Image (spheres, rainbow, N blue to C red):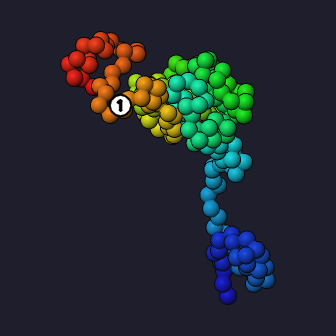
């Protein structure tokens, strides 16, 4: 005769009730091993903590009108649930864009809006998103914070100027005096980019 039956609590699948009845029938003592009580999270609490992926897109508007936006940029604007940018740019957006718009361009203000985790945010920039643009400063901050984003350049201001004056720009010496200490005439005459 067995005196003890040591088993884990395997529930119905593990035949626990049958083992318990057998012990009762034989007069054996049942020692049940159970997992320690877990202090983990419930499925509900985990799901509450799951964030919907936020999509951030920076769209270039070149000369500041929708005519300078690429097809890919127009798609991003169409899908956006919130559009952020300078007031004059927001005013030039097509009717198909959301009316949920915030006029701002300072990085600190933009970050405070991003913290609200809006689902699909598009930021609009005039000029070229890769040439002395507010987009580059925001990209650096987003990179530092490991926040994903996509940049969709538009038709750049340089391209628009080149087309307007019928001159190719591959030999131009490009400089910017926007937001930095620069003497464009001196920079160009010294051959600095």
Quarter of the picture containing the N terminus is bottom right
Q: Is residue 135 left or right of residue 43?
A: left
Measuring 22% from the left and 17% from the top, which residue is drawn there?
189
**Considering only vertical position in the picture, is 97 above or below 43?**
above
Determine which residue is flagged by label 1.
169
Q: Is residue 95 left or right of residue 65?
A: right
Residue 57: x %, y % from top left: 56, 36
Extreme residue in the bottom direction: 1
Callout 1: few (<14), some (14-19), or many (20+) C-alpha neighbours within 10 Å? few
21 or 162: nearer the viewer: 162
Q: Looking at the rendering, which quadrant does residue 112 occupy?
A: top right
**Considering only vertical position in the picture, is 45 above or below 32?**
above
112 or 39: nearer the viewer: 112
Measuring 51% from the left and 38% from the top, which residue is drawn there?
152
Can residue 83 be seen by looking at this rendering?
Answer: yes
Can residue 116 be seen by looking at this rendering?
Answer: no
**Considering only vertical position in the picture, is 24 above or below 184?**
below
Measuring 73% from the left and 71% from the top, which residue is drawn there?
11
Measuring 77% from the left and 80% from the top, which residue is drawn there?
18
115 or 133: nearer the viewer: 133
Residue 16: x %, y % from top left: 73, 75
Q: Looking at the rendering, which quadrant does residue 128 occupy?
A: top left
């Amino acid at each position: 005769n067995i005196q003890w039956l040591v088993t884990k609590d395997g529930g119905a699948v593990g035949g626990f009730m049958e083992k318990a009845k057998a012990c009762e029938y034989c007069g054996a003592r049942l020692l049940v091993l159970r997992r320690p009580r877990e202090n983990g999270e419930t499925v509900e609490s985990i799901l509450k903590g799951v964030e919907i992926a936020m999509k951030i897109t920076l769209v270039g508007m070149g000369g500041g009108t929708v005519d300078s936006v690429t097809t890919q940029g127009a798609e991003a604007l169409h899908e956006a649930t919130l559009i952020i940018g300078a007031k004059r740019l927001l005013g030039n957006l097509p009717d198909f864009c959301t009316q949920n718009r915030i006029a701002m361009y300072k990085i600190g203000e933009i970050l405070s809006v991003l913290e609200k985790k809006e689902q699909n945010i598009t930021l609009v920039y005039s000029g070229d998103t890769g040439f002395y643009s507010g987009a580059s400063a925001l990209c650096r901050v987003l990179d530092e914070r490991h926040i994903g984003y996509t940049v969709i350049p538009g038709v750049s201001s340089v391209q628009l100027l080149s087309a307007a004056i019928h001159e190719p720009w591959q030999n131009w010496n490009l400089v910017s005096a926007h937001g930095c200490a620069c003497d464009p005439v001196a920079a160009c005459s010294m051959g600095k980019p």
